[in-house]
Image (cartoon, coloured by chain):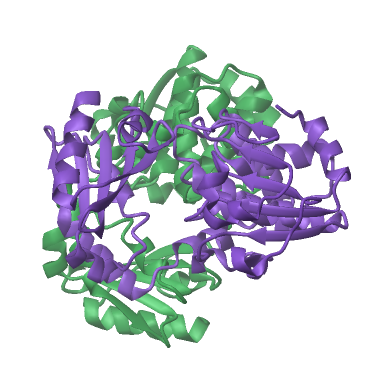
Chain colours: A purple, B green
Amino acid sequence: MNCTSHDLQNLWSRYHSIMLTAHVSPDGDAIGSLLALYHWLKEQGKQVVMVVDDDIDDKFKFLDGAEAIQKPNAVHTDGQWLYVVLDATSADRCGKAADLIQGKVLNIDHHISNEHFADWEFVRPDVAATGEALTALFLEWGVGMTAAMAQALYMAIATDCGFFKFSNTTGHTLRMAANLVDAGAAPNTISEHLEAQSLIKLRALSEVLKHIELFAGNTVAGISFTPEVLKHTGEHTGGYIDYARNVKGVDVAFTVKYISDNETRVSLRSKTVDVNAIAAVFGGGGHVRAAGCTIAEPLSKAKKMLVKEIIRNK
Amino acid sequence: MNCTSHDLQNLWSRYHSIMLTAHVSPDGDAIGSLLALYHWLKEQGKQVVMVVDDDIDDKFKFLDGAEAIQKPNAVHTDGQWLYVVLDATSADRCGKAADLIQGKVLNIDHHISNEHFADWEFVRPDVAATGEALTALFLEWGVGMTAAMAQALYMAIATDCGFFKFSNTTGHTLRMAANLVDAGAAPNTISEHLEAQSLIKLRALSEVLKHIELFAGNTVAGISFTPEVLKHTGEHTGGYIDYARNVKGVDVAFTVKYISDNETRVSLRSKTVDVNAIAAVFGGGGHVRAAGCTIAEPLSKAKKMLVKEIIRNK
């Protein structure tokens, strides 16, 4: 069932115990949305647990409450609980956290590829971030927005719209962010934590930048994270794709990452091309300008298949 | 004389011919403010010329009207003109454009170090950008904000607050930006032009990242643009300093750049330290978190003097 803001407000009052979860490989929007809703529900006197089936990136740990996020095996719930799936298109995207679900599910999300799987849903593909939808809800409900909530939500919004640079940035996005700064969000603290890089990371970047390749008349740029390059970068390769995307004249950027000899993880970004459609060809998805998929082929073959598909879609 | 928004509105009506100028080494705020005011005054039927005593960075040339910005020697004005100095603390900061001034001067600026030199001034150190002050004025005057004006002003604001990451980002900053997106500013187009990098630039970045040095228990990071490094980067070295600033644990970042054997250009950024005060020791200035100066010493000596002064101020 599609919920209005008012329906949601009523829903909370029917439950005392609430489990919050979000997608695996949690990004800023997943973590920020999780923490903001956690703080608010605690304030309402609820029993709340946050569960994510993944490690939390160190850069998010400056946020209040991040230390309370648990792994699925540490959590016990029952059929009386409400299960809230944040920033995910399906329960499956939450990995083993989905196995904990024994009751009704509420899904709050903003992905166009949402699978409309939940008992209740609040899905807003017109906003840049789940955190933007949550900010609007909190403001509408007129509840006190604490500085901790504001900080988490500003991070959620800012990370999903590339700090107000991507095409999903609307007047509404910026207005929600304005309200959050008024309520105590500190953009400089947030960006400092998100962007803090060790010298080792910068040396890794120096290495990655040598490996950018151009295709299709320099309109497509790609980075291959071979086992060799991964030695420099480590497993966390998010963010490098933006360097490929920013090459002058490039419309579509991709990274292909070695997972195993027959598995390659693909990330896609674009300026005009619908990369959600390209990712869908390989069973993946995401947004029009940012998507991903996994190809069950060796890296070099996966790269060829991907470039071919990108060119076909341009 | 300090002007109110209303005073300014009256001022325009007293002049038919208006020269707009901004500081040398014009940044996004200088160029964006110049263009927005240019478009608006043209719309009011004024004769307007824009003068900057410097080359305009290619990345700003996507903006409507950028091609109309002239060098001082191409411009003729007289005592009947109004001279508007934008985003500059003094007329001197405009280089040879200042020599064209033969009449009354209006200064619109947001620098705390403003020298209050003009006949009329609208100086707002509480806003993040001159473009933010201008946006508020245009909205207050209720004049039609065209997409070209909105685009220029969004760029002005976004570049001066690091795309809503710096501590000068307030609710007001974001609210002005929201109005600009509503009026047709396209954040993605702006950021794509600002961030478009040639592969050559990325290879240069790869080189620069190898040269970051840490001082004072890894709380100060610096990059030296020696003639050797400048071979890779070219003369435009702005932007690299952010990589030094983002090193984990770093509070103050600086770059020292070879100008001649006895002249070194210094840029400073910080997270908490007042770098305006440090730059002032060497006769420079700027903002609390971003400042610059020139030291009449060879690069290596200038660097030592600078690091000593930074440590003294921490």
At horizontal 13% and vertical 38% (from top left) the residue drawn is: A215
- Residue B59 or A258: which is nearer the viewer? A258
Q: Position of residue B169 (x, y in %)?
A: 59, 50
The image position of residue B222, as x and y in percent, is: 33, 74
Q: Which residue lies furthest to the top in this view?
A: B45
Quadrant of residue A167 within the rendered picture: top left
Looking at the image, residue A200 lies above or below residue B236: below
* Left or right relative to A213: residue B287: right
Residue at point 59%, 18% (across, down): B13
Left or right of A192: which side holds A184?
right
- Locate residue A38: give its quadrant: bottom right
Check the image and report above or below for B260 versus B134. below
Q: Percent from the top left, x then y, of residue B202?
A: 20, 54
From this viewpoint, is residue A144 visible? yes
Residue A309: give x, y in percent of width and height: 21, 31
Name the residue nearer the viewer: A214 or B74.
A214
